[in-house]
Amino acid sequence: MKKRHIIAAATAAVLAIGVAPAAMASAATVTFVASTGAPLASQTITGLNPNGDTVYLTLGNFPTGKGLYVYQAVQPAAGTRPAQVNSASEQWVTTAMGGTAKPTDIIKVAVDNGHAWGADCAHQTCGIQIEFDHDSTADKSQDQFFPISFAATGTASATTTAAAPSVTITAQIDGKDLSGTMPGALGYETPKYVVIKTSDGEPATASISADPSGKTFCVIANNTIKALSATGACNLNIKVGSGAQVNFPFMLGAGIQTLTNKVTSIAHGKPVALAAKTNFGEAVNYTATTGKTCAVVGTSVIGLRAGSCVLSASAAASANYAALATKVTIKVK
């Protein structure tokens, strides 16, 4: 059974791990608690299960109107942020839609020995990192690191089997690397193919996790991810059979309404049908702006005489995309 651990972050405890007093003046206060929310008597987190455990904490003095990331990482050099990060442990604490926890919640951080994400917490200093979220990346006033340690797994001997090499998982969309801390962007009903690579070639599976309200705003199938809403957020989870996994967050936005017309030229005197719907299924309204060259009847165009026929095309908006307003040019022969 996993142990439940907590830490309380008084100013003295934070100073003991090298955080400058100036940085703590307005930083959130961190209290590591039991799963019930009761503070632990000891503020030193040791003896965690290296195969997987949970650290619980609460946050006080939360920055108004802001969000924080809370996650396991290897302790960074002074003045920098962690380079080795357990993406699967990350919690986005915010009042915004799509957050994984609210500022008033008991925050649950899943931790392990680091082997699944390229670290070794038996020989490196691992801990809980807290920092501003993607809306305030340049502001380091909330940066705090709290060391944790794990129970020994036994005495090594000459016959000890070497630990399996860690597996690194990376993912790209449109040739750009996805980040475990900086959310990517997805437009409503705009499918994107995710290129997934593992360092050892091990097959990976991708899924979407629901937000704290239980809602799922994205879907993924055959490595193609799609947003089902123009608002909110979703998390792409990628894992391999050996247990390694990563989490990539996305913020959702409006889709782009488009019109595809294959008609580029017509003969005068003959009506030709135009596209009646946009890519989102909205009905298209056409108006001829060159009345002497062509005329519109419903969603058909008729050439009146040789020349350039210019049409104005429009379609209604919705909560997930803006209205369409574009021009269509057709040659009348």
Image: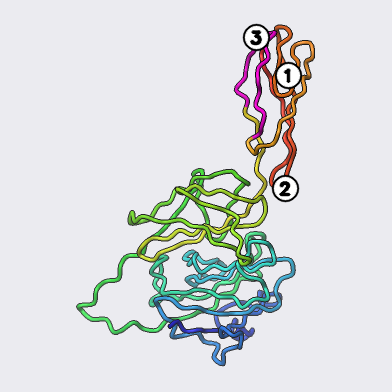
Main secondary structure type of the part rendered in magenta: loop
Q: Position of residue 255 (x, y in %)?
A: 65, 43
Disc 2 and disc 1 in contact, CB within 8 angstroms: no
On screen, residue 141 above or below 282: below
- The residue nearer to you, when weighing 104 against 48, is 104
Instruction: For mark 2, give the secondary structure.
Output: loop
- Give me the C-alpha separation between circle 2 and circle 1: 29 Å
Which residue position holds label 2? Answer: 319
Disc 1 residue type (three-letter):
Val
Q: Which residues are magenta?
A: 261-278
**First reached walking from the N terminus: tag 1 or tag 3:** 3
- Give me the C-alpha separation between circle 3 and circle 2: 39 Å
Q: Is residue 214 left or right of residue 291?
A: left
- The residue nearer to you, when weighing 331 against 18, is 331
Disc 2 residue type (three-letter):
Ala
Q: Which circle, 1 or 3, is nearer the viewer?
A: 3
Which residue position holds label 1? Answer: 310
Q: Is residue 86 left or right of residue 33?
A: left
On screen, residue 114 above or below 168: below
**First reached walking from the N terminus: tag 2 or tag 1:** 1
Instruction: For mark 3, give the secondary structure.
Output: loop
Q: Position of residue 14 (x, y in %)?
A: 59, 81
Disc 1 and disc 3 in contact, CB within 8 angstroms: no
Which residue position holds label 3? Answer: 267
